[in-house]
Image (cartoon, rainbow, N blue to C red):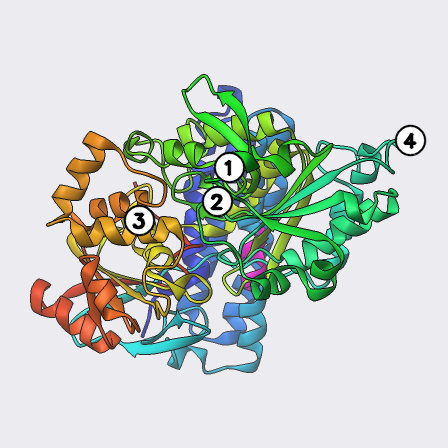
């Protein structure tokens, strides 16, 4: 039979205990027997009641203890407000703790409801928040199922659940009506100037799951209500250095009505005539952006806030600062100096040189307003905010951290990372699963371990300029050391940074791509192509031995596993 420690609710309660004790160390001495003690007791009560109820072995008794645990979790959430109001913790710390408690309370509620209908829960340890022995991983628009060979011990890391918004369009309207740190969008448009005002909305390309088909029409409605003329609105697809978007992709992102009614164009990062020079940042980054964005009277951006290998978290300024940028900025911020910097990491915002550079670039482009979302693992909208770019993004990052960042006990011999559509269409994008798991705050895989990524890669390496540079660098170098040495000595153009990043990964781990439709491209890029998960796991067993710890991360571009310090 499983133990209480195998329950996800107990694991999450334990994480909350650790966070609470780290926070209370900063409380004033006079609070050590007051507020600090109270919130610590509530956190420990949550975890302890889950364990104690589990050991009783009957659903009725267990449910009673789970109710106590749920009440204790609510107490922690309330006391987090008190600590914030007294100035003992920061707004981000309070919001993170409250979000974790909310998520745990929702999971406890569901667990209680399940126990009411399943009195034999204790005979089936694989259910009710315990990790299953059959695993599922995204693959294209479907999934792959697999089991682990004997001797392999499996665990799963998933983002914490968050309640999907029932009415996303209503939530978007509410966010626009009450934006963060900014007047509503309509108020940014003086009535006397509306008829001549030019607006540019930068939106994400097809490689991003941002629901622009909902975000952009909502913004357009606001502009129309402020009497901005349709012909004065430009919708700029922020492709960065990716290939131009196709007409079909523009329709998929925006809807046919929008595409037919408004001017929709792509960024042109290599066309000097399409760019405006915005100078050089104090850190030496050359800034330029598409003319349609810079010359607009009002610049707006959509976006998706999720873990990002360079920016820490995407969204916010990045849609404009990189998506609408010239090649020089992209080359500099994705160059060896930035990528090698220890502060350019997944999940890190503070002190991150990449984040600082794109923040300055967006300021110079005069980005005034954003509308961004956070998605869950099923690509459902769980949070939406609009408003002043920096403050709105800060609040979205705090929410995203509360669901995406998940503590794990140690590094693993084998890590299986899922990608799924649309990012597994080419190797350039799909390989991010491996690099995200490697460039987590601590690499999730042990040195010499295996990173396994199921991905169709029907487009090969990808068709864009950057994707083809990645392919050429990986294919033409004799080994990964040559890629690293050449990049550090001579630098590289935008897109080729993915070769540098993957060379750093391959220097320490084996990368296996499962089910690729272009195994020749996978092999040319110095990774291993196999047809099935069984074949990939057998390969790991042959090279590392049969007794292995395996971590499955179904959504490796969202879930950020953090090795417990």
Asked if the residue at tag 2 contacts the one at tag 1, i.e. Cβ–Cβ closer than 8 Å, the answer is yes
Numbered range of the magenta stretch: 102-108
Measuring 74% from the left and 46% from the top, which residue is drawn there?
175
**Neighbours of disc 1 within 10 Å: few (<14), some (14-19), many (20+):** many
In space, the residues marked 4 and 1 are separated at their CA atoms by 31 Å
- Disc 3/disc 4 C-alpha distance (Å): 49 Å
Using the image, tell me which numbered label, if any, was put on residue 240: 2
Q: Looking at the image, can residue 89 be seen?
A: no
Check disc 2 and report its element: helix, strand or loop.
loop
Q: Disc 4 marks which residue?
A: 192
Q: Nearer the viewer, residue 382 or 121?
A: 382
Residue closest to the far right: 192
Do the numbered discs 3 and 4 sit on residues whose CB atoms are within 8 Å? no
Check disc 1 and report its element: helix, strand or loop.
Answer: loop
Q: Main secondary structure of the magenta part?
A: helix
Where residue 216 is drawn, which disc sits there? none
Q: Residues within 10 Å of mark 3 (few under 14, many from 20)?
A: many
Residue 45 in magenta stretch? no
N-term-proximal mark, 2 vs 4 = 4
Instruction: Name the residue beneath numbered marker 3.
Output: 469
Dot 4 falls on a residue whose secondary structure is loop
Could you tell which of marks 1 and 2 lies nearer the N-terminus?
2
Picture coordinates of residue 426, whole percent (x, y): 37, 62
The spot of residue 58 in percent (x, y) is: 47, 75
Residue 325 badge: 1
Q: Earlier in the sequence, mark 2 or mark 3?
A: 2
Label 1 to label 3, Cα distance in Å? 18 Å
Lower sequence index among marks 4 and 1: 4
Hey, which quadrant is residue 535 in on the image? bottom left
Against 34, residue 195 (above or below) is below
Alpha carbons under labels 2 and 3: distance apart: 14 Å
């Amino acid at each position: 039979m499983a133990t209480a420690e195998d329950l996800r609710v107990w694991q999450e309660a334990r994480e909350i205990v650790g966070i609470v004790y780290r926070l209370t160390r900063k409380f004033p001495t006079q609070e050590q027997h007051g507020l600090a003690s109270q919130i610590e007791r509530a956190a420990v009560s949550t975890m302890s009641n889950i364990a104690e109820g589990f050991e009783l072995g009957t659903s009725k008794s267990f449910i009673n203890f789970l109710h106590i645990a749920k009440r204790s979790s609510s107490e922690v959430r309330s006391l987090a407000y008190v600590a914030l109001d007294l100035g003992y913790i920061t707004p981000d710390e309070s919001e993170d703790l409250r979000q974790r408690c909310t998520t745990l309370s929702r999971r406890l509620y569901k667990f209680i409801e399940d126990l009411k209908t399943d009195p034999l829960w204790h005979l089936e340890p694989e259910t009710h928040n315990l990790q299953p022995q059959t695993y599922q991983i995204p693959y294209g628009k479907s999934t792959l199922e697999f089991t682990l060979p004997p001797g392999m011990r499996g665990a799963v890391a998933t983002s914490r659940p968050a309640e999907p918004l029932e009415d996303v369009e209503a939530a978007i309207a509410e966010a626009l009506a009450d934006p963060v740190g900014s007047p509503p969008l309509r108020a940014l448009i003086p009535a006397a100037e509306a008829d001549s005002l030019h607006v540019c909305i930068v939106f994400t390309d097809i490689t991003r799951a941002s629901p622009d088909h909902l975000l952009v029409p909502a913004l357009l409605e606001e502009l129309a209500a402020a009497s901005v003329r349709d012909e004065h609105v430009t919708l700029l697809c922020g492709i960065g250095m990716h290939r131009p978007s196709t007409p079909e992709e523009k329709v998929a992102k925006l809807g046919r009505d929008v595409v037919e009614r408004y001017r929709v164009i792509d960024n042109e990062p290599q066309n000097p005539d399409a760019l405006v020079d915005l100078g050089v940042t104090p850190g030496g980054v050359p800034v330029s952006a598409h003319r349609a964005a810079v010359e607009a009277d009002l610049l707006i951006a959509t976006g998706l806030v999720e873990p990002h290998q360079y920016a820490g978290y995407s969204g916010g300024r990045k849609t404009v600062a990189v998506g609408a940028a010239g090649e020089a900025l992209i080359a500099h911020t994705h160059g060896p100096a930035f990528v090698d910097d220890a502060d350019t990491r997944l999940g890190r915002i503070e002190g991150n040189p990449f984040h600082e550079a794109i923040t300055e670039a967006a300021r110079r482009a005069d980005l005034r307003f954003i509308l961004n979302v956070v998605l869950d693992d099923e690509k459902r909208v769980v949070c939406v905010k609009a408003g002043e770019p920096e403050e709105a993004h800060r609040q979205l990052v705090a929410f995203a951290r509360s669901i995406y960042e998940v503590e794990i006990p140690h590094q693993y011999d084998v890590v299986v990372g899922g990608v799924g559509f649309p990012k597994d269409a080419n190797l350039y994008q799909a390989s991010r699963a491996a690099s995200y798991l490697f460039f987590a705050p601590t690499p999730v895989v042990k040195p010499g371990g295996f990173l396994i990524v199921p991905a169709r890669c029907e487009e090969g390496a990808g068709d864009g300029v950057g994707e083809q540079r990645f392919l050429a660098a990986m294919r033409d170098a004799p080994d990964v050391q040559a890629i690293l040495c050449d990049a550090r000595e001579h630098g590289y153009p935008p897109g080729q940074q993915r070769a540098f990043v993957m060379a750093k990964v391959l220097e320490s781990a084996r990368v296996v791509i499962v089910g690729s439709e272009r195994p020749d491209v996978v092999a040319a890029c110095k990774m291993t192509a196999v047809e099935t998960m069984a074949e990939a796991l057998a390969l790991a067993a042959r090279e590392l031995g049969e007794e292995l710890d395996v971590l499955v991360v179904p959504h490796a571009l969202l879930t950020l596993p953090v090795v417990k310090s």
